[in-house]
Image: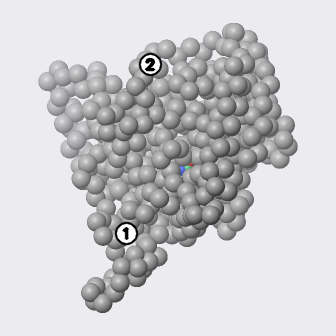
Amino acid sequence: VKTKKISAKEVSQFFLDRAQRLDTKLNSFIGLNPDLLQQAEAVDQRIAKGEDVGPLAGVPYGIKDMFCTKGLRTTAGSKILENFVPPYDATVVAKIKAAGGLVLGKLNQDEFAMGSSNETSFFGSVKNPWNTDYVPGGSSGGSAAGQAARLCAASLGTDTGGSIRQPASFCGIVGVKPTYGRISRYGIIAYASSLDQAGPMVNSVADAALSLEVLCGKDARDMTTADREVPAFSKNINRSLKGLKIGLQKEAVQAGGLHPDVQKSVDQAVAFLKSEGAEIVEVSIPLTEMAVPVYYLVATSEASSNLARYDGVKYGYRADFPNLSAIDLEEFYSKTRGQGFGKEVKRRIVLGTFCLSAGYYDAYYNKACQVRRLLRDQYLAAFKNCDVILSPVSTSPAFKLGDRIFNPLTMYLNDIFTVSTNLAGLPGMSVPFGFSGEGLPIGIQLTAAHFEEQKMLNVGAALEGAAPDKKKVPHVY
Ligand code: GLN
């Protein structure tokens, strides 16, 4: 776009046409930006005037519907926000625009980012473009499916317990969750504030690195953002593995229970890294076995508090009360929230409220926080012996729609390898590496020490180059 080989408007038109033509099969978008082409033209006009538009000049992003977009409906996949139009942009959305990028549309997701299969959205399930009988993963399922089918040039997701990495793995794209504090959460609808992070879901490690350069950085509007310089991730990518120590996480690869095709991808990835001169060392995070219960106590506790704001008073859905003065506040809240939230969200509000209640707080919430701290310490110890930890993203490739949604426990266990990263605040990513026998993509997870995204991106770039069948494209494409 910058060199005027193609205009921003043509690029936007290309992706818009694809989204309109192909998304009937996937349901990855909740809404498209009606002003996209006009905004793309504005980029072209600035380029014509010789202005430096920024590193993302004319790049149409699909944005998960957790991010507030000024003047553009933002639902978090929930009926309770079905008609919510934010008066401001999330910091990351503002940053994309300031770098010349465009908002193509808003992507479907599990309701309030609670889920691993994108089957809890008020706007319907999303389908996996590699095989539409299968889930795309969740909660950023719309971002993963839309990106894999190339309905947008890049996309944004959020990751509280794996929601960038797991759907990226299920759909065969690159997904990065940076260190907690790298990216501002201002304007992102809150699920579990101490775990939530935004990140890119894109076609390549290079695209992820470039996106991160724009997205990261201290924000005066989010006190938890880190005052750290943002490295030139994309320029610094180095695929050489000589002298690098890759930690193979014992619990993740020896516990058994891994789908044989996932095991095969892990084995092939390790063999490749070894052949390129990396040293493979075994590392252990024994508290991995506690990660799922700890995560579901912390996340639901924070969610029960964060979601208290949807009370039908200031914004969002309000139940229909023909005679408002005849009802009491309790009835007003319970009817509004009872109708506005879906089943999974209610389950978590109830569980979180229970964990935080007097008498149970110490036994559940407090205990979970203590184990969380110990888990973090185990990671810090492991990173004394290695640069990057390699593990599967998920125990299996994508599963079938409807297979797990009626059994929350099976669904939660699916997150075993991703939630620890969030509990410890570490950066993690998923890189596509091979396919299952059924032709579904499989991702490899890389985790680095706090603020060491570059090391992880470097190993990711090396793996990406060696990925089996990397020219394959999805069925819906
Ligand atoms: N599957 C996990 C959950 O349901 C993670 C979701 C996420 O990262 N937003 O909470």
Q: Secondary structure at mark 1?
A: loop
Instruction: Determine the residue located farthest toward the top in the rendered image.
Output: 243
The mark that comes first in sequence, 2 or 1, is: 2
Q: Is residue 323 visible?
A: yes
* In this view, the mark in front (2 or 1): 1
- Residue pictured at 71% horizontal, 38% vertical: 392
- Residue 165 pos. (x, y %): 59, 41
Using a 10 Å C-alpha cutoff, classify the residue at mark 2 as few (fewer than 14 neighbours), some (14 to 19) or many (20 or more): some
* Residue at the spot of label 2: 231
Q: Which quadrant is the N terminus positioned in? A: top left
State the separation of the CA atoms marked 2 and 1.
42 Å
Instruction: Left or right? Give the position of 289 relative to 344.
Output: right
Marks 2 and 1 in Cβ contact (< 8 Å): no
Instruction: Determine the residue located farthest toward the left in the rendered image.
Output: 49
Residue type for callout 1: Asp
- Residue pictured at 77% horizontal, 27% vertical: 283
Instruction: Left or right? Give the position of 163 relative to 246.
Output: left
Classify mark 2 as within 8 Å of ligand 1 or not, answering yes or no. no
Q: Secondary structure at mark 2?
A: loop
- Residue 335 pos. (x, y %): 42, 80
- Residue 75 pos. (x, y %): 38, 59
- Residue pictured at 78% horizontal, 37% vertical: 286
Q: Residue 460's quadrant in the figure?
A: top right
Q: Residue 379's quadrant in the figure?
A: top right
Give the number of marks: 2
- Residue 257 pos. (x, y %): 83, 47
Residue type for callout 2: Pro
Q: Residue 445's quadrant in the figure?
A: top right
* Residue at the spot of label 1: 311
- Residue pictured at 37% horizontal, 29% vertical: 218
State whether residue 191 is above or below residue 288: below
Instruction: Left or right? Give the position of 48 relative to 200.
Output: left
